[in-house]
Image (cartoon, grey):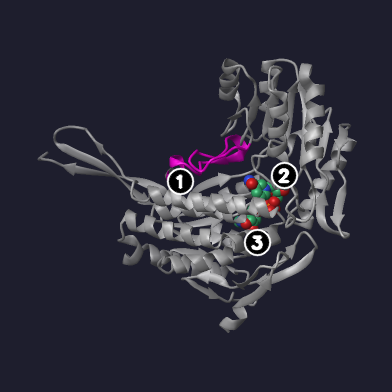
Amino acid sequence: SMADLKVDLTAPNGKKFTLPTGLFINNEFVKASGGGEKITSINPTNEQDICSVEAASADDVDKAVAAARAALNHESWRDISGTERGALMFKLADLAEREKEVLATIETWDNGKPYGDALGDLGEVIACLRYYGGWADKIHGETIPTTPQKFAYTLKQPIGVCGQIIPWNYPLAMAAWKLGPALACGNTIVLKPAEQTPLSILYFATLIVKAGFPAGVVNIINGYGKVAGQALASHLDVDKVAFTGSTATGKHIMKTASVNMKNITLETGGKSPLLVFADADLEQAAKWAHVGIMSNQGQICTATSRVLVHENVYDKFVALFREEVNSTSKVGDPFAEDTFQGPQVTKAQYERVLGFVQSGQSEGATLAMGGKPCSLNGKGYFIEPTVFTNVKDTMSIYREEVFGPFVVVAAFKTEDEAVRMANSTTYGLGASLFSQNIELAHRVAARIESGMVWINSSNDSDFRVPFGGVKQSGIGRELGEAGLAAYTQTKAIHVNMGTKL
Ligand code: TXE
């Protein structure tokens, strides 16, 4: 019954709310079919169950896709103006703003990120929806002069039914990055959240109904990657798949999506470098380097996880960086106000990061700080902020994405060597560089193989500016005007103005 599909919860910070637990299809919460396994969400701070939610089977994915297809062709969505689509998005943003404390509470409880950071994520969700709501009536083709006998123009049309597969590091923000442009361009959506963090998006789904979106425009199906994710990526009636997650899964999705030549965008792993040149403001470099790797428990796709420092300032930088970690990176209860770093999202991620501590030590790097598990009353997936120095670019801790509060520091001698070391991984997502020399800064920024470069900052992203990777960090761009390209296709119309045969 419907009564089974919600649960009354009281969060560790005392917030009470009712959470739907069903699959969100056609603006309703429904049971999963097939009697399959549910998803039980675990609080990474104390390792206790929060609650269980429905997990979609391949049949449920079919239902959600059918709902999205019907909505795409229904006049209540197909025939409304961009201005009206924008108005729905503004309404959704307003509702998210009104409910941001509940949404941030759920995010912190489920994911383990500090509550202040979760509130920051909500700010991004709201801003992103408003930004793309503003675009909704400004998406248009062009007229193209050819010959006097021809009138040629283009239409920017929606791609159609879009599958969106979301990771667990920023559950709501990653959903907003994908929902915003897709809705602005008039698509319909089947979104699959990560099984590690299924909860906040269910509360968010209630706001989609309240905002007045027609049934079937947005469908949200929690489910396991290998079941629901796989069914979505391989579905013959899905026109596009957008994915954020690991490079391995991204490659698999790319192959799977080829079954009907789906349009794809991928945002995958990274091992983003942060370069400190000899003339840099070292104090600022140390502070930004800290923010760039230790925020969000290091679970950031653009985390500046490799710090490359000119040999002349190496020792001084490392001392300043250690001081910054010591004074700022307080590990603890994510609901406590002075906490900078909460637990890793799951036991699997926690073990993975600790595994990299071992490989760093056996590869002969110097463990300069941290590297040990820690806990709160004996529980929780906490890890001390970890710094390795004397790292060589042949070591796995230099090349592989760790996705934790884990940074490697290496030295370079020349600008050429810095660029070569920065570019020496298979990834190309973000990069930072610190220098007071504007010529050097812009020259190096152009030579680094990455989708984003921050000069004299790190991870200072903005919803108005394109975001995405090169090499094995992804295909396509999200955010900014560039993000619209991922959700429209160009149709060319040729009008004969008088050519007679
Ligand atoms: O990722 P997956 P995981 C990296 C990070 C992390 C590692 C593993 O290094 O340690 O990936 O994390 C869905 N068909 N990043 O295992 O598997 C899955 O259900 C379709 C970086 O959690 O990529 C989830 O919704 N979908 C990253 C999503 O893919 C499938 C953020 C991501 O899971 C699927 C997260 C399949 N066969 C992890 N298998 C970033 N770029 O920020 C899984 N999924």
Q: Position of residue 295 (x, y in %)?
A: 70, 44
Residue 79 is left or right of residue 243, and the answer is left
Look at label 1 and name its amino acid.
Answer: Ala
Look at label 3 and name its amino acid.
Answer: Thr
Q: Nearer the viewer, residue 18 or 85?
A: 18
Q: Nearer the viewer, residue 170 or 376?
A: 376
Q: Which is closer to the viewer, label 2 or label 1?
A: 2
Which of the marked residues, 2 or 1, is nearer the chain's N terminus?
2
Secondary structure category for the residue under label 2: helix
Q: Nearer the viewer, residue 280 or 371?
A: 280
Whether label 2 touches label 1, CB < 8 Å: no
Vertical comparison of 171 with 492: above or below: below
Span of residues in magenta: 459-484
Q: Position of residue 280 (x, y in %)?
A: 68, 21
Residue at image mark 3: 105
Secondary structure category for the residue under label 1: helix
Q: Nearer the viewer, residue 333 or 301?
A: 333
Residue at image mark 1: 486
**Residue found 64% across the figure and 54% down from its top:** 118
Residue at image mark 2: 298
Secondary structure category for the residue under label 3: helix
Look at label 2 and name its amino acid.
Answer: Gly
Which of the marked residues, 1 or 3, is nearer the chain's N terminus?
3
